[in-house]
Amino acid sequence: MPRDSLALRTIRQRAFGQASVGLGLRGAVTCLQDLRQEGSARAMLPRSAPDWPEVVFLNTSGGLTSGDRIGFSLALGGGARVQATTQTAERAYLALEGPASLTVAMTAGAGAELVWAPQETILFEGAELERRTEIELGDGASCLMCEMVVLGRRAMGERPRASRLTDRRRVSLRGRPLWVEQLRLDEGALALADGAAVMRGGSAFATLALCGQGREAAVDAVRSVPVPEGVTAGVSGWNGRCLMRAVGAEPWPLKIYLGAVLARLTGRPLPRVWQMQGVNP
């Protein structure tokens, strides 16, 4: 019998997880109403101010590679308020057999206030990640979303050239699209990243979006936050949207700046996991 016919098929372990949290008002306090956890996805609710609880999502698999599927969902009842984040940076590793997927689905009832500020996503060389974020707002609700992407570990001399990221974002108000965009990074885009019109040699970039009725007025508040050396940022506002883009030569000054903008817009302390890393404007 030929030796090749005796070879065993390799079955690679994949990570799967889904964490869902439901919050609603009990009197004037936002309280937990539902919690479900499956696989390698977890959700924690650390002790915090009762009027602004925190939800911390976690992927216990330690990173994402081919075939991994992780989902986080959050349902916020009318009038409730919450700050949601992730415990640590999400790492997208080498993916030789197709993409990993990360799905975020959130709803905010009438008059609710949602802050979604996950910690940064780090793209390693050869990573392939498909991320989809969908947020549905009720009448008078708002959401503040902030996402940061880091290209490799600069301290280790990494500069990804063959990584891929497909990032789809959609925020709807009363069932109608309010802000929709798609970002795609691939080998071609990364080859142009050092250009002045793209990242100008930066190693990290971020998008911050504040969406809801009248939220375009937040432009002045964002512009009042000093931009540190090594960070380039721009902000605009129109028809219920305040949108900021920022690029950092290094990740840390960019994250410090994002923390300052988040604190200015919410008027609240940053989530504890941000503070534990030294981000405390």
Image (tube, grey):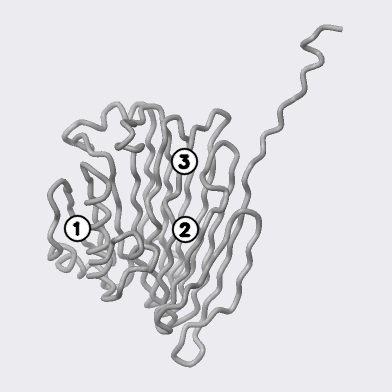
Tell me the quadrant of the picture where the C terminus can be found.
bottom left
Is residue 139 or residue 267 the one in the foreground? 267
Which callout, 1 or 2, points at the residue further toward the start of the chain? 2
Q: Work out whether 112 lies above or below 9.
A: below
Left or right? Give the position of 24 relative to 124. Answer: right
Q: Which residue is mark 2?
A: 134
The image's mark for residue 236 is 1
Dot 2 surroundings within 10 Å: few (below 14), some, or many (20 or more)?
Answer: some
Rendering coords of residue 194 (x, y %):
22, 31
Three-letter code, disc 3: Ala
Rendering coords of residue 33 (x, y %):
58, 79
Judging from the image, what secondary structure is the residue with disc 1 in? strand
State the residue at coordinates (40%, 84%): 51
C-alpha gap between disc 3 and disc 1: 30 Å
Dot 3 surroundings within 10 Å: few (below 14), some, or many (20 or more)?
Answer: many
Tell me the quadrant of the picture where the N terminus can be found.
top right
Rendering coords of residue 204 (x, y %):
28, 43
Rendering coords of residue 75 (x, y %):
52, 71
Q: Which residue is mark 3?
A: 92
Q: Work out whether 191 lies above or below 41.
A: above
Is residue 148 or residue 61 the one in the foreground? 61
- Give the farthest residue toward the right: 1
Three-letter code, disc 2: Glu
C-alpha gap between disc 3 and disc 2: 20 Å
Judging from the image, what secondary structure is the residue with disc 3 in? strand
- Give the farthest residue toward the bottom: 27
Which callout, 3 or 1, points at the residue further toward the start of the chain? 3
